[in-house]
Image (cartoon, rainbow, N blue to C red):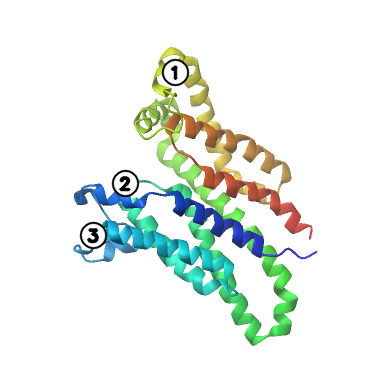
Amino acid sequence: MSIRRKPLELYIFGIWFLSIMADPIHVLSKLPIEIFQPVGILHYLPSGARHFLAAEAFLWTLKILTLAALFLAVRGKRLWPAGAAASVLLTVYQGIVRGFGYINHDHLPLLFGVYLLTLFSFADERTRRRDPEGFQALEPDLDRLAWLSIPALMLICYSFLGAYRLVFGGTELFMSDALKQWIFRNVHRVAYFFWWDPTLLLAKQPWIYVWLKAGFPVATIVELLSPLCLFYGPARWVFLGVMLPFFFLNMIFMNIPFWQNFLVCLLVFMVPRVRSS
């Protein structure tokens, strides 16, 4: 039975739609313009463009246009024109957010996923026009490749993150109290559990931090070896068994909800289905 790509497109673009819908990006206009340091392609814009990019009217317009492009990408007959627009708008969107100091690495696999699905759609149309019969024969394999590429991309990003932490942090990172510093720094952000005070809990129950610290290198090793999920079924259960609690602990101790990554991680279970189709 052929695996169709449309559910994957709905899934990835739908996650983005919900993320952008819930994101109050317009509040960035209230921050001092001096702290705005454009990154990526925005870095090459004239310095005077910073005021324009950080204006509330522009941020609202960017949000509305991005939502419209994401909606049209999955509702239209051809994904790639709206997908290309969504790719550009999301790149600008993420560049502005990152420019105000938020390290949004959890969005990178999803952003790359939009790029990939858009390129797949563009390649489909070009191939269909040039060789309709050949495209019909290749279409099931192209759909399988698309389903494999998104989890593969996510797993490779995790592997790079684990490798970076091991190379630049070394054993000193895991022996130090860097994890406690991150918890104390992020606890000042808006909490998702208003009755929850991680600093007070760690002060009264120090054994909890011991367990958190012990799990830190375990999560790093699992991240480093995460591409094994593409080839070895049991590795997927180990990956999810470690990373899903890791996401939950990040949310309750650092106020960082990785719900997008949680949803993308579930795609690793689609790998055996695609391979057996």
Q: Which residue is mark 3?
A: 50
Whole-angstrom CA distance, mark 1 to mark 3, is 41 Å
Q: In the rendering, at what x and y percent does residue 33 appear?
A: 21, 51
**Disc 1 on helix, strand or loop?**
helix
- Where residue 201 is drawn, which disc sits there? 1
Q: Earlier in the sequence, mark 2 or mark 1?
A: 2
Q: Is residue 27 above or below residue 253?
A: below
Quadrant including the C terminus: bottom right
Q: Is 201 drawn above or below residue 226 in the view shown?
A: above
Which residue corresponds to the image point at 59% horizontal and 70% vertical from the top-left? 120
Find the distance from the CA under tag 2 to the CA under tag 1: 28 Å
Q: Answer whether labels 2 and 1 touch (C-beta < 8 Å).
A: no
The quarter holding residue 128 reads bottom right
Rendered image quadrant of residue 179: top left
Inspect the image, locate mark 3, and give the three-letter code of the amino acid beneath it.
Answer: Arg
Image position of 46 with respect to 201: above or below: below
Q: Position of residue 139 (x, y in %)?
A: 71, 73
Label located before the other in sequence (1 or 3):
3
- On-image quarter of the N terminus: bottom right
